Every structure is written in structure tokens, then in C-alpha cells.
Image (spheres, grey):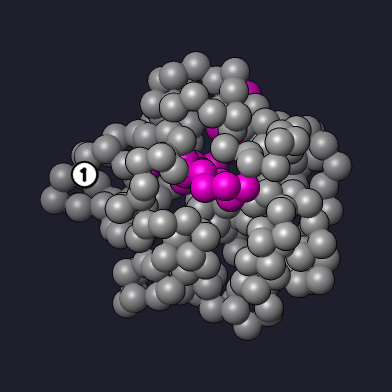
Amino acid sequence: MANIASIERALASVGEVAKSSDPNAIQASPKIVLPGVGTFPAAMAWLRETGVADALRNAVAGGASLLGICVGHQLLFEDSDEMGLTAGLGLCRGKVRRFDNSLVAVPQIGWNRVSVIENVLFEGIPDGTPFYFVNSYRAVDVDEKDTLATASYGEPFVAAVGSGSVCGVQFHPEKSSDAGLRVLRNFVTATDGSTP
């Protein structure tokens, strides 16, 4: 449910990559990237029906590092109210809710500057660096200690999250020029077992 080709190319520029929807292969992987576009309910339904949801949870429980991108980032949380309430993977504390369209045009489309809290995922990326976003929803009620970066779109929102070996970015690193590639490189090369 994403532009797999562009993400695959971006990852290939920073390391070896294998594309798979096989739950067994996913569960055995030490580093996993979960991309996503479209709706939260459709993406979550696919993850459940294919067994990938359980594979992701098992992989993380076994020590794998996981990076969610865009809707993949949103799927990491407890639930979303997009098109009704849908449970997420529950790997990060928080809920996914729509931007208040009385404040801004929804969806957010384009470049937005990100305020970075020092962490491995954003190593070497200056505070205020712009990243490319396409989103109508954002995470709320996220633990402050799990917030890796924020941005503002009518209101402050979480641009990146990290909890243990699980992290997610609301923006599209594959569309965010050198800074986006640096985020992917940082994820791929982190070796401490706790990506954020």
C-alpha cells in the first residue's frame, strides 16, 4: 500500500534490501521498513489478513528494529478514527486523529520544517530541516519520551516517534532529498538494538 519502488530505491542506496510480504521472512528480519499510503483501515486489514501484523509484533519482540513510514508510522499506534475506529499494531502509545480542518487545509501536502530531538534516527540532521509530508492524520497522546521530532501544521504534531527498537516517521523520507536518505541510512546502520 505504498510506492514500494521509490522506497526500495532509496533503501538500496544505503544498504542491501529485500522486498517481502511473507510473514516468515518478515519475522526473521533484523531490520524492517513498513511503508504505507492510503487509509489506515485498509492497511491494517491487509496486515491482519496476511499474517504480517503478527509477524511484525513477533519480530519486534525478538529484537528486530522496525521503521514505519507515513501510514506505516500511523499503524504503529493503538488506534485510528479514520473511517471509524480501527485498532493498530499497538507498538507505540498514542492514537491517530485527523488534523482540525478549521485551522488548516487538509491534507497537508508539501515540505515542512521538523524540530529534532537528539536521537540516532536524526543523527547529522540539523534542527529545522524540511521533510516532505502528505497526510490528513497525525498521532496524538504520544508519550513525550517517545517523541523524536515534531512539526507544526495549524498545531504542533509528532513527526517522528520511537519506542525501544520501533520508530516511525510521518513524512516520506524517500521524497525528502538528502535529509530523507540520511534518516534511512541512520536506521539501516544503527546497531545498538534500540534505533531511536
Q: Is residue 160 magenta?
A: yes
Nearest the viewer among 106 and 146 is 146
Q: Residue at x 20, y 52 (%)?
A: 100
In the picture, the quarter occupied by the C terminus is: top right
Q: Is residue 75 visible?
A: no
Circle 1: is it few (<14), some (14-19), or many (20+) Cα within 10 Å? few
Q: Residue at x 55, y 57 (%)?
A: 72
Range drawn in magenta: 158-180
Task: Answer with the quarter of the image where residue 79 lies.
Answer: bottom left
Q: Where does the image place residue 43, in percent across and percent down from the top left? A: 54, 70
Determine the secondary structure under disc 1: loop
Nearest the viewer among 88 and 101 is 88
Give the farthest residue toward the bottom.
49
Left or right of 76? Residue 20 is right
The residue carrying mark 1 is: 104
Nearest the viewer among 96 and 131 is 96
Left or right of 49? Residue 23 is right
Amino acid at pointer 1: Val
Q: Is residue 143 magenta?
A: no
Nearest the viewer among 48 and 103 is 48
Q: Residue at x 65, y 27 (%)?
A: 182
Q: Where does the image place residue 179, in percent across and percent down from the top left? A: 58, 25
Q: Residue at x 36, y 50 (%)?
A: 142
